[in-house]
Image (cartoon, rainbow, N blue to C red):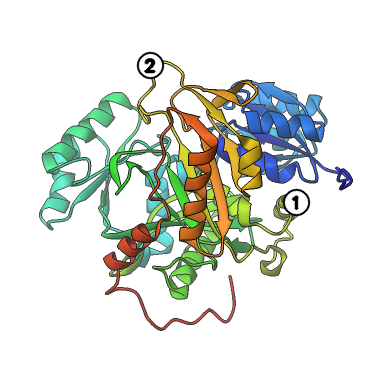
Amino acid sequence: MNPEPTRSDHFLLVGGGGREASFAVSLARDSVVSAFVTHKNPTIVECVARSGGALRIGDVRDPNAITRFAVENNIEFAFVSADEPLAAGVVDSLLRAGIKTIGATKAAARIEWDKIYSISLMQAVAPEFTPLFTVVETPEQIPDMLRIFSDRGLPVAVKPEGLTGGKGVKIMPDHLPDYESCAAYARELFSSRPTEQVLFVEKLDGIEFTVMGLTDGINLVMSPASYDYPFRFENDTGPGTGGMGCFTATTKNLPFLTYTDIEDCAEIMCKIIHYLRLANTPFNGIINGGFFKTSKGIQFMEFNSRFGDPEGLNILTILETPFSEVLKKLYYVKLRNHSVSFTRKASVIKYLVAPEYPDPSPEPTTFMLDQVLLDQMGLNVFFGACEHVEDNLYRTLGSSRVLAIGATADDIPTASDLVNRGIDRCLSGHLEYRADIGAQKDIDRLMSRLKTQIQTTDTPPQTGK
């Protein structure tokens, strides 16, 4: 029997989704974990209890309540990596109370919660990677701003200025068949979000991917790139979601990327971090870049100021360096490229959701899950919007993603097949998922889309950023 690890550090997590569940699993290996959560997430509850921490249910957008909880429980370190707490200034409040906090301040997190700010910042520091965009300040400007794109024959992505949980952006022709539909949606955004502006961006033609960088505000370590599946149904159909699943490869790039592509992404992130530091808004934590691989090379889509969900789950499952050590390096500005390592395994994460998702369910869905068998199969389970009822019985909560199941393997399709087998064998109930995530057929589809754009001869960079 292995001895219980010495738990010298005490970490606070904020949030209750699958992403925070993965943080809890990683930190509970060697640290005390306390959590301020939206609901009794079964994974987080188990990790908190096993590590000897404290749990509080509350509003994760309430900086004062979270800070009181941290002080009452003698928290040493806090890690905040969810969009709503970051935008609410939770990091700022914890830092003022003397808590060693890893995560972007509200000012630094503006690169996520203000899309207009982020793309304007990109235009200033890296215009060659920035697509055509216009900012619409009033409904009356909609026709003129759209004409900039229609005169060029360019399809448009219509984006609200602020946070929408990954469900507010609509694009031509997937969601909006023509320019008039774009105008109608823009007017709808002005009506529903009257204090915000609207962003029109050239719809990028290519493959979307994500790269997350770990930064202490000066240094940057790139995690493996990931490919996310934002659409609800197989073959990328249906509405956009918070992300139905994701994969990473055995190296830091993806099958359709080159090392030069990754270097370009690192260059962009370094420029952003440098700009923010000079502007006296240093960025600490995770800078999450959404990019497109296009015929013109890498093009910027968006920034997130925290681990992506599900992308963060992938990264945590292949991280070799203890997560607690990584977070402390971020806080103490001791991050170095050689100090963070990842396994040379591919990872696949798949979310299970209620049939109505992303729409609200009329009533909770119950399901059975055999975690013992999943463990025996080498699979990872991260609960999200659900609660434990009894034994192997669980019940969904709200309209968010219910739980994620993931695997690592020597290649992406093998990991995908393993997750599918685990779901089929270990779960019963009316939950749905995308079996095609990471499947060989889908990877072949991605490769065929860019086969004329991918360099066939590409060598690893001599130095890393």
Identify the mark at residue 9; answer none if there is no mark. Answer: none
Residue 105 visible to an observer of this rendering:
no
**Residue type, numbered disc 1:** Lys
* Relative to 137, residue 341 above or below: below
As drawn, the residue found furthest toward the front would be 425
**Residue type, numbered disc 2:** Pro
| Residue 425: % across, % down | 52, 40
| Residue 444: % across, % down | 34, 64
Locate residue 398 relative to residue 168 in the image: left or right.
Answer: right
The mark that comes first in sequence, 2 or 1, is 1
Locate residue 61 relative to residue 175 in the image: left or right.
Answer: right
* Relative to 239, residue 315 above or below: below
| Residue 228: % across, % down | 42, 51
Question: Looking at this view, is 47 or 9 the one in front?
Answer: 47
Residue 290 visible to an observer of this rendering:
yes
* Relative to 47, residue 342 above or below: below
Instruction: Tell me the SS state at disc 2.
Output: loop
Q: Residue 458 is drawn in which quadrant?
A: bottom left
Identify the mark at residue 362; answer none if there is no mark. Answer: 2
Instruction: Tell me the SS state at disc 1.
Output: helix
Identify the mark at residue 328; answer none if there is no mark. Answer: 1
Quarter of the image that includes the C terminus = bottom right
Q: CA distance from mark 2 to mark 1?
A: 43 Å
Locate residue 181 relative to residue 365 in the image: left or right.
Answer: left
* Relative to 393, residue 283 above or below: below
Locate residue 259 relative to residue 379 in the image: left or right.
Answer: left
| Residue 86: % across, % down | 56, 37
Tell which tag, 2 or 1, sits nearer the viewer.
2
Question: Looking at this view, is 400 or 167 the one in front?
Answer: 400
